[in-house]
Amino acid sequence: MSGFSSVEPDLDVCADEFVRASAEAEPAVAARLREDFVRIGLPLAGRLAGRYAGRGEPAEDLEQVARIGLVKTVDRYEADRGSFTAFAVVTIRGELRRHFRDHTWGVHVPRRLQDLGLEVRRATDELTTRLHRPPTDAEIAEAVRASEADVLQARTSLAGYSAMSLNRQVSADDDTEIGDLLGGLDPDLAAVDDLTTVGSLLLRMPQRDRQMLALRYWGNQSQSEIAERFGISQMQVSRLLSRALTWLRTAMLTDVVPAWPGENDEPGVRIELYTGTGRERIARVRGEVDRDNAGELRIRLLSALCAGRPTLLVVDLSGVPTIDAAGLRALVTVRDTATSRGTHLRLTGVAPHLAQLITATGLGSLLR
């Protein structure tokens, strides 16, 4: 299929291409397009199958079941019904859960009860034939040399050996499932896996980002309220929330949890000092300036003012995407110190949205 790459692409984009191309293609060409599209979706099926590993089923069987779910997704997908990826995740998970429901034990029975259950069944048949009536629990217990409590427990475990599925149809002519007759569906049950995964991923996030997510989506606080709480700008809160949500979405659909963005970056802002012409100094600032590193910015710039008593200090802020109230206070301190020492201070490379903040702080005369 033209446009498809061997590198895993965006499945939603490929799905739209597949639907359009298949609608205009001959049957033989449409079949080949279908095979190509299924092949592109195999990595997604493998990742979802991997989440169910270690539960007693062979990994190869789980991957085959997931691939069957992928094929069903491709055959049933309708472009006007929404995202293909979301539909694929729901369908493949349904196939995997159905596999566990139909091919594994409903309950775990200890080996001791399994053996005792077989003896109880055999003794019941023998005593019924000999006594011409159903035996009592005491008579069965005496025959198998066990207590009546153990006999009752063994009989109960036998009933759970071949437990009937709640998804079994009531009859061949009725599509109603047995579970439908026992009570209503729990709408939160399908989200248990996702909630468990999200909970473990949240513990991997930095505390500040985790608190912001909690305040925004559990505390129902606005971005402005969160910004005031942490002493940063609303724009920075918006960017941090977007970064956290993007990382969560990526981690939910991958086997290996990706590194946290910026996890290996050097702490604080980066400040590079250069010597200009004569007694000029240039300080290039890179990174976000907030209350955690505003002190570092103030100390480095004051040190540049004291070293050699420059006549001009140029602070290049072209590499600063955001600056909060603490950072602005640091610049005010540097401005006051420069004035007292007879050094001119100039701010360059300031983004338009930061220029408004700097001007409102009373530093507008320093902008160039």
Image (cartoon, rainbow, N blue to C red):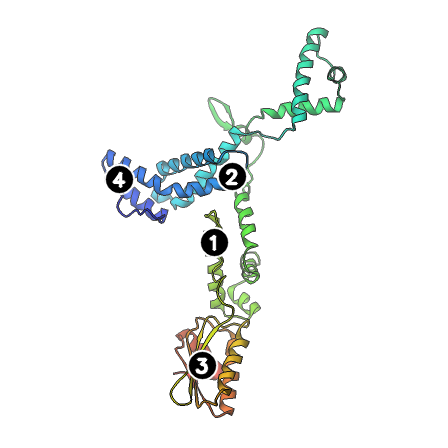
Alpha carbons under labels 3 and 4: distance apart: 59 Å
The answer to which of marks 1 and 2 sits earlier in the sequence is 2
Label 3 vs label 2, nearer the camera: 2
The answer to which of marks 3 and 4 sits earlier in the sequence is 4
Q: Position of residue 135 (x, y in %)?
A: 72, 13
Alpha carbons under labels 4 and 1: distance apart: 38 Å
For numbered disc 1, what is the local secondary structure? loop
Q: Position of residue 57 (x, y in %)?
A: 52, 33
Alpha carbons under labels 1 and 2: distance apart: 20 Å
Packing grade of label 1 (10 A; few <14, some 14-19, many >=20) is few
From the image, tell me which residue sits under label 1.
258
From the image, tell me which residue sits under label 2.
53
Q: Position of residue 295 (x, y in %)?
A: 55, 76
Q: Name the image quarter holding the C terminus.
A: bottom left
For numbered disc 2, what is the local secondary structure? loop
The answer to which of marks 1 and 3 sits earlier in the sequence is 1
The answer to which of marks 4 and 1 sits earlier in the sequence is 4
- Please give left or right for residue 360 compared with residue 184 in the image: left
From the image, tell me which residue sits under label 3.
359
Q: Which mark is residue 23?
A: 4
Q: Is residue 146 above or below residue 180?
A: above
